[in-house]
Image: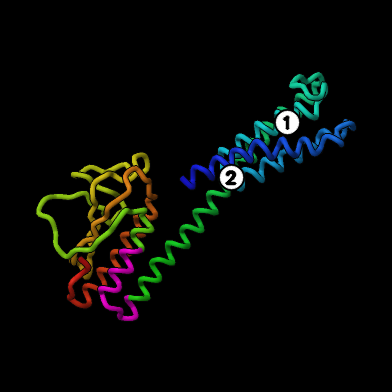
């Protein structure tokens, strides 16, 4: 729900910001040399919206900027009719440049978000590794890993058990893929399945138990995060391999 409202607000900003700026620049429109300057300001607005609101907001802002420029800053004013060829070319260029620059700004925003996410995931692994290196009790390591998995994978719940089922179960493999009955589940398009998923905990070359993941159906989780989950499980395996104790129920 929060992400949906954030998207809606970004799209609204993509409409309001260009229109507001176009209105604010009306006092400067009487001089023909200001037309290009107004267009450049509108492009800057598109970049700002796309950088903060994402690709969809950037597209909306590009269209709103071009229409606002046409309506308020080309003759005849307060009309979508353009009588001068130069103004028409400027409006078209504004739309094209706005779309391109907005897309680049949005892509930069996504890359920045991915970098922040990767840094946070590395911090998760480091925190658990420090517990293992400090000789923390396996129960504490398992609890820490369980909490990290819930947050990392957007799970409803997660538990650890030393027992294994006789029948094959859906499993998060060491390569980050989710396997269902021998078939790879398309996480990128379908998100989590509705069934529980096993994440086997290995230590010193043998299984010591499994985390039973209760996913949120339909929620996508990136391959990078699934690989981090496997790395966290390996840390738990290292702690269990060092001391043979009961896991969390």
Residue that mark 1 sits on: 68
* Relative side of 1 to 35, left or right: left
Res 207 visible: no
Q: Which residues are magenta?
A: 132-147
Tell which of 178 and 53 is nearer to you: 53
Residue 48 placed where, x, y %? 66, 46
Q: CA distance from mark 1 to mark 2?
A: 20 Å
Quarter of the image for residue 240 reads bottom left
* Relative side of 35 to 237, left or right: right
Q: Is 133 covered by the magenta stretch?
A: yes
- The residue depicted at 67 percent of the width and 40 percent of the height is 46
* Relative side of 183 to 46, left or right: left
Residue 241 placed where, x, y %? 21, 73
Q: Tag 2: Cα neighbours inside 10 Å, few (<14), some, or many (≥20)?
A: many
Eyeballing the image, is 57 above or below 128? Answer: above
Colour scheme in the image? rainbow
Tell which of 23 and 59 is nearer to you: 23
Q: Tag 1: Cα neighbours inside 10 Å, few (<14), some, or many (≥20)?
A: many
Going from N to C along the chain, the mark reached first, 1 or 2, is 2
Q: Secondary structure of the magenta portion, mostly?
A: helix
Residue that mark 2 sits on: 53
Residue 6 placed where, x, y %? 54, 45
Res 169 visible: yes
Quarter of the image for residue 162 reads bottom left
Eyeballing the image, is 24 above or below 212? Answer: above
- The residue depicted at 26 percent of the width and 72 percent of the height is 238
Residue 38 placed where, x, y %? 79, 37
Eyeballing the image, is 213 above or below 3? Answer: below
Q: Secondary structure at mark 2?
A: helix
Q: Secondary structure at mark 1?
A: helix
Quarter of the image for residue 12 reads top right
- The residue depicted at 30 percent of the width and 80 percent of the height is 135
């Amino acid at each position: 729900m929060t992400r949906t409202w954030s998207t809606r607000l970004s799209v609204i900003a993509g409409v309001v910001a260009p229109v507001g700026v176009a209105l604010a620049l009306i006092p400067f429109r009487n001089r023909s040399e200001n037309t290009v300057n107004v267009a450049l300001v509108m492009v800057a607005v598109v970049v700002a919206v796309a950088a903060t609101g994402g690709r969809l907001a950037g597209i909306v802002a590009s269209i709103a900027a071009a229409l606002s420029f046409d309506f308020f800053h080309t003759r005849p004013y307060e009309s979508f009719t353009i009588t001068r060829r130069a103004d028409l070319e400027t409006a078209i260029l504004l739309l094209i440049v706005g779309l391109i620059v907005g897309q680049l700004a949005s892509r930069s925003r996504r890359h920045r978000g991915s970098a922040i996410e990767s840094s946070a995931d590395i911090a998760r692994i480091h925190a658990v590794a420090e517990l293992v290196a400090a000789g923390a009790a396996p129960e504490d390591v398992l609890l820490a890993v369980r909490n990290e998995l819930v947050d990392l994978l957007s799970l409803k719940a997660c538990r650890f058990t030393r027992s294994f089922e006789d029948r094959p179960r859906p499993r998060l493999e060491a390569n980050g893929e989710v396997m269902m009955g021998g078939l790879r589940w398309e996480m990128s398009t379908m998100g989590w399945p509705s069934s529980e998923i096993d994440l086997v905990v290995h230590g010193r070359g043998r299984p010591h138990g499994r985390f039973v993941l209760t996913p949120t159906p339909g929620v996508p989780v990136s391959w990078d995060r699934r690989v981090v989950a496997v790395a966290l499980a390996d840390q738990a395996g290292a702690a269990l391999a060092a001391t043979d104790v009961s896991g969390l129920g």
